[in-house]
Structures are given as C-alpha cells and as structure tokens.
Image (spheres, helix red, strand yellow):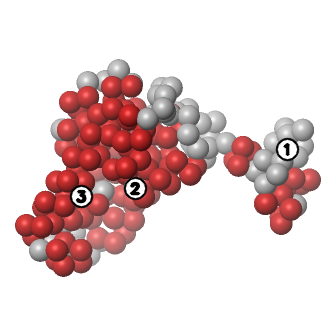
C-alpha cells in the first residue's frame, strides 16, 4: 500500500524524498514484503515466486486469506481510482485502506493469530509478513468467520478477566447471549 503511494508524485513523502529516492525506498519495501509473503505462500503450498509478481501477489494473498475475488476487485478499483482521480483521491484511498485492512485481518486469522497480529500486519507489513512467513505461524487455510463483517471472535477478546467487563458491565449483560460460562 505504502509502496504505491511512494510512487505517486503528489504524495508528500514522495515529493520530500525526491523521485529517485522514493523509487529506491518503494523497491526496498516491496522486496521485504514479497520475501515475507513468499514464505507464507510456501506454507500454503503455493509457488513462492508468485509473491514477487506485482498484481498476482496481492490477488494470491486475497485468495489465501479467504477474502475472495470480489473484495480484491473492490480493492483494485478503489486503488486505481485513488491514483487516477484527483477529486476522489481521499475517499478512494480510504476505501483501499479499509479493504486492505480487512484482508490483513483475514490473513492473520487464517494463520491462527488474532487482532493484535492483524494490526501489526497492517502497520508494519514488511516485518510482520516475514514473521508470518518464516516464523512459527501455521497456515490453516482460508479464514471462515461466522460473520464476515467480524473476522475475529469478540468473545475471546472479552474474556473473563477483560477490563471491558468491569467498565461496561459486559460480563453480566452478554453472558447468556454469547454462551459464556
């Protein structure tokens, strides 16, 4: 995501770095992310070389996470609109971030991780992609949440010792509804 923005001359960081340096930084970020995703693709039984092919790597990541073709299409259209249309740039890029964040949530859920891991993948993708690809994470197949708008089980986050229970009295109010003991 940041790689594409670095290549857009109107992006403040790209203009501050200058075009040649922005291209070098973008290439370094791309190679780091691709190396991490190559390890993750290998865990999933997919050819690791797909991680280094520009559009195919994102499409394969969307497929691996269980996000699907439609979400990838929406992501690609919003990204293209954000780059091409100056008037709709902010709205399109916000949509792009939303679709990509959802894919990150689904990807880490497919690896058995939870919400903090999704935030790490979204905010520090080169580092956390390498951790997922070459670390102890195990790819369990595409994530299949019960509710597609809620990729994680909130009941796990709101455990028995959660600070939310005390502050908002969620423990007593939702105890029977969510089937907790």
Residue positioned 29% across, 60% down in the render? 2
Where residue 151 appears, as percent x and y from the top left, is 57, 43
> Which numbered mark, 2 or 1, is in the foreground of this view?
2
Spatial CA span between label 1 and label 3: 44 Å
- Residue nearer the viewer, 75 or 112: 112
The image shows residue 133, relative to residue 86, as above or below, that is: above
Spatial CA span between label 3 and label 2: 13 Å
Taking the image as drawn, is residue 174 in sight?
A: no
To which residue does mark 3 refer? 3
> Which numbered mark, 3 or 2, is in the foreground of this view?
2
Spatial CA span between label 2 and label 1: 36 Å
Q: Quadrant of residue 92?
A: bottom left
Left or right of residue 62, residue 86 in this image: left
> Which numbered mark, 1 or 3, is in the foreground of this view?
3
Left or right of residue 154, residue 46 in this image: left
Please identify the residue farthest to the top as the structure is shown: 45
Where residue 52 appears, as percent x and y from the top left, is 20, 38
Left or right of residue 64, residue 166 in this image: right
Residue positioned 7% across, 67% down in the render? 20
Mark sitting on residue 124: 2
To which residue does mark 1 refer? 177
Residue positioned 19% across, 58% down in the render? 26
Where residue 147 appears, as percent x and y from the top left, is 62, 41
């Amino acid at each position: 995501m940041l790689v594409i923005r670095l290549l857009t001359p109107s992006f403040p960081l790209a203009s501050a770095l200058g075009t040649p340096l922005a291209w070098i930084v973008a290439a370094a970020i791309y190679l780091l992310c691709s190396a991490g995703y190559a390890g993750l693709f290998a865990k999933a039984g997919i050819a690791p070389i797909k991680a280094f092919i520009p559009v195919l790597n994102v499409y394969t990541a969307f497929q691996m996470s269980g996000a699907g073709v439609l979400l990838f299409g929406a992501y690609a259209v919003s990204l293209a609109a954000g780059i091409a249309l100056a008037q709709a740039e902010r709205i399109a890029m916000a949509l792009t971030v939303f679709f990509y964040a959802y894919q990150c949530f689904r990807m880490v859920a497919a690896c058995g991780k939870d919400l903090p891991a999704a935030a790490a993948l979204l905010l520090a993708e080169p580092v956390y992609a390498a951790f997922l690809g070459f670390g102890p994470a195990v790819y369990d197949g595409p994530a299949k949440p019960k509710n597609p708008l809620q990729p994680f089980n909130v009941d796990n986050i709101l455990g028995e010792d959660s600070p939310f229970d005390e502050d908002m009295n969620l423990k007593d109010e939702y105890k029977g509804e969510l089937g907790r003991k």
